[in-house]
Image: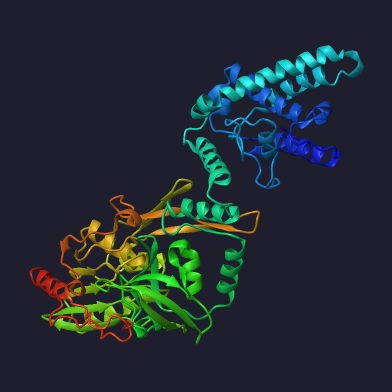
Amino acid sequence: MIKRTTATTKTDNRVNQVALLLSKITYNGANTRTKVPASLRASPIISAVYFFSLKELLSQAEIGRSVFGKGLQFNTNLPQKGVFTDLRRAFPLRSLPSTEVPETRIKPDIIEALSRALSVALSSGSQMSTKIKSAILVASAGVLLFSLAGQIRGVRASNNDGAYPQFEVYSEVLSRVRSEYVEEPNLPTVTDGALHGLLESLDSNSSYLNADQYKAYKDRKIGAKGDIGAAISKRFGYASVVAVIPGSPADKAGLEDTDIIEAIEGKSTREMSLAEIRSLLTGDPGSNVNLSVVRARRSEPQKVVVTRDIVNIPPVKDKMIEDGIAQIRVDALTKGKSQEIANRIKTLQKSGAKKLVLDLRDCAEGEEAEGVATANLFLNHGTITYLQGQKFPREAFNADPSKAITTLPLVVLVNKGTAGPAEIVAAAILDNARGDVIGDKTFGDGSIQKLIELPEGGALILSVAKYYTPQGKAIQDNAVTPNIVVADVADDVAVPDEDENATPSDIEKKTAPEHDEQLDKAVQVLKSKQS
């Protein structure tokens, strides 16, 4: 039974939404405004007939792929409860869309001709008998039903990416949840969960924030100065520590790379987007954040309290090892680090260094631009990396010969905590055959995000482009595999199990073996190379 209302304002509102939709159809990037006949404002049912009749007539005229090939895109500033929600109530057919009709691009002259023809037929008033007008309506309704019956087949032809059928799947699932779940569901929570899962299925850096989460996100971004000092991503659906900055609050609390943060302040991180996780870990210096941490070979999660603070990135370190071989240790590639590395290289060369080890293990923080600049210090030609996305034109970063400062033999050390800008450096050195990369496969993180505010107050943080290696592999998808693989020494260090209630800060730090096998291998490789 269709619920009817006598309030003309509600009817006018629904019909005006149809008029607005039709007036906002885009053609070649510009809005095409089409006047909807006044007679069509008599009823939302007639408006529906008008719209779907236009669609069916266009498709029957074999305009086909050129008209409907890319779908129907409407301006997103329409009211949230659009006319198609009302149409579903009026036409309870599964094939009628519950959110948006597929996008299309219709030529202005075609719309005007069809609009004028239907306008003349329906606006004749006293010149046309009721029977004739009724016959026209019945015929139009037939065209409508014919169009609806062909939706399942027609959608496949008019939407190559299959997105439109998925709207129907989502609508069907939501309908079943509402009608058949064991108890009345909390639909806002269900919707938030669905959107969270949708974004996380793309990659860990893409996030959906509802209105409350987005407000908290903005407030923390503006006001928060303190942090825990650890690179965080998601693994197995939970927050994961990629690397810890030496001397940071996370380091002092005993957190280590590969730790899983199961919960923050008692809330499971599985239910959070990465943006929300990172936001919750920031705060005022001196404030505490309570974490539940899962660590390998520990049977129970450990409770950890981290006191936020202003994180200072350690300076670049260097030392002479043996036989003219120098090691340069980098903990993060934040702004200015490439220049710091350049200064260290120049100093080492003056001190007699003939070969270099660039140690990027557990280097996961920083800016991609610093990664590009650091790689350029060792490369006088070739591609360092490039950015590319679906709607993001390829942007290549090539080595500038004037910025290269050394031709000394080089080895780059990496491990599972190497991520982001450091991976750009390692991949550039490896793919351009400038040196060897030794260690473990890196983490795999390299993309840029765009923040898109939504009408209801929420936001999307969407990955729009990825960084690629010179040989064309997406760093985020493939990471960087060393040409000489040597397992991380930390993987072989036993963790004490006696006290199951001990926190990470209570547990004595893993004691590294007497020899750093990755560094030893780097020295061995460099000794075999000519200066």
Q: Residue 247 appears in which quarter of the rendering? A: bottom left
Toward the left, the furthest residue is: 528
Q: Position of residue 186 (x, y in %)?
A: 59, 55
Q: Residue 443 appears in which quarter of the rendering? A: bottom left
Q: Is residue 351 above or below residue 292?
A: below
Is residue 340 shown left or right of residue 392? left
Q: Position of residue 294 (x, y in %)?
A: 33, 72
Q: Residue 252 appears in which quarter of the rendering? A: bottom left
Residue 58 in view of the camera:
no
Q: Position of residue 371 (x, y in %)?
A: 36, 66
Number of marks drawn = 0
Is residue 392 shown left or right of residue 35? left
Q: Nearer the viewer, residue 58 or 380?
A: 58
Q: Is residue 516 above or below residue 104?
A: below
Toward the front, the furthest residue is: 182
Is residue 383 shown left or right of residue 87? left
Say which residue appears at 35% left-offset and 82% top-offset: 251
Instruction: Specify how the rendered protein is coloured.
Output: rainbow
Q: Quadrant of the C terminus?
A: bottom left
Say which residue appears at 57% left-offset and 42% top-offset: 175
Q: Is residue 154 above or below residue 368?
A: above
Q: Quadrant of the N terminus?
A: top right
Residue 146 in view of the camera:
yes
Q: Is residue 92 above or below residue 361?
A: above
Q: Position of residue 412 (x, y in %)?
A: 22, 68
Q: Nearer the viewer, residue 70 or 199?
A: 199
Q: Nearer the viewer, residue 126 or 161?
A: 126
